[in-house]
Amino acid sequence: MISIKDCGLMLEPQQGMSVEEIIGWAEYAERNGYGFILRSDHLLPTFGEKNGIDSPECWTTLGAIASKTDRIKFGPLVSPVGFRNPALLCRMARTLHEFSRGRLVLGVGAGWYKDEYNAHGIEFGSFQARKEKFAEAVRGIIRPLTLAMGKVEFEGRYYKAHIETLPELKHGKIHLIIGGASESIARLASEYADEWNLFSPTIDSIKELKQTILHEKFKEYRREEISNLEEEEEKKKIEISQMGTFVISNTRSGFEQKIEGYKKRRNINDSSEVVIKNLRARGIICGTSEEVIAEIVARNNAGVDKFYFQIIDTKDREMVDTLTETLRSRL
């Protein structure tokens, strides 16, 4: 049975959070027993108002989180290799992992937000090129550098690395997360990641993805390419996690008020019943405390090991408090 230690809060600081607010949420999550505090890695706001809004740089704030917390695990979900050179990214990750006594989790992705690339003079490239670069970076550099001792020698089409794996990982390997529901990303995750992350999946989609994409990949297997790096990596079972927003209240009337507020903010004219149905069809966990717990348990039974709750409206502290108390008292 899962507990709040298998859950985390997911922040979107590119929408205008201060560094102090990010640290405050990390301290809140640790104080209340969450296992994880995660944040996006974006250089510009990704939705809503975009002018004049600060987007605190991800890895700078991760360092701040590491220095202000003691137990909680933390990291990016996810850092794009498109503007994070994979060898340098792993050097950053190893440094912060050791400084935090083994608490960093490393989520990586191919990148999708063209505007932030253009604004910073970084080549974006086609979808196919981004996928190829990402796969090469994971196979040749990121996975070896989150495991190995010694030296990594790699010459690829897009990336090169000829570096010592420093600092030494005295606190164990770096937990690697790869997210995405496409077949190519899922298979990459099944071969090289410790965790496969999905965005707001439905229970049916979780079951379908496991059956049609990964097949036997979720059973123990031998990863021949890197089995010589660490003995314990020869056999493993990948974890499945999900990230997404939520709507919760202790009472039915309170939940309906939350839905009405949601409709107003988005100028939705549909009935509350239709909105709730649509939210659930999109895989968003919502309802009363009892309904949310039932949904989490059902997803856990379907194969989800970890739950990362995305906070879109950081001003609605009351709803986050309700989620926290629900997870603490009923899981």
Image (spheres, rainbow, N blue to C red):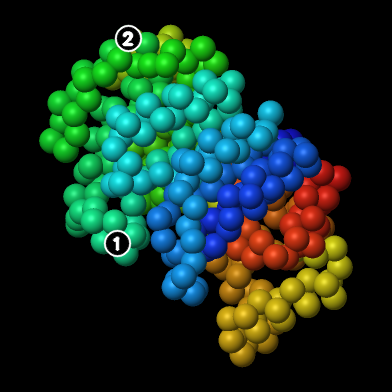
Q: Which residue position is annotated with label 1?
A: 119
* Picture mark count: 2
Q: Are marks 2 and 1 in contact (CB under 8 Å)?
A: no
179 versus 117 height, above or below: above
Residue 184 in sight from this viewpoint: no
Residue at 26% in and 27% down: 140
- Label 2 vs label 1: CA separation? 37 Å
152 versus 256 height, above or below: above
> Type of residue at label 1?
Ala
Residue at 44% in and 24% down: 94
Residue 151 picture quarter: top left
Residue at 38% in and 16% down: 166
Q: Is 143 on the left-hand or right-hand side of 126?
A: right
Residue at 26% in and 61% down: 118
Q: Is 297 on the left-hand or right-hand side of 305?
A: right
> Type of residue at label 2?
Gly
In the foreground, 269 or 187: 269
Residue 19 in sight from this viewpoint: yes
Residue 213 percent across, percent down from the top left: 38, 45
In the foreground, 242 or 14: 14
Q: Which residue position is annotated with label 2?
A: 150
In the foreground, 51 or 5: 51
Residue 280 percent across, percent down from the top left: 62, 67
Q: Which of marks 2 and 1 is nearer the N terminus?
A: 1
Residue 91 percent across, percent down from the top left: 37, 26
In the foreground, 271 or 43: 43
Badge 1: residue crowd in 10 Å (few <14, some 14–19, many ≥20): few
Image quadrant in which the N terminus is located: top right
Tag 1, which secondary structure?
A: helix
Nearer to us: label 2 or label 1: 1
67 versus 205 height, above or below: above
| Res 223 label | none
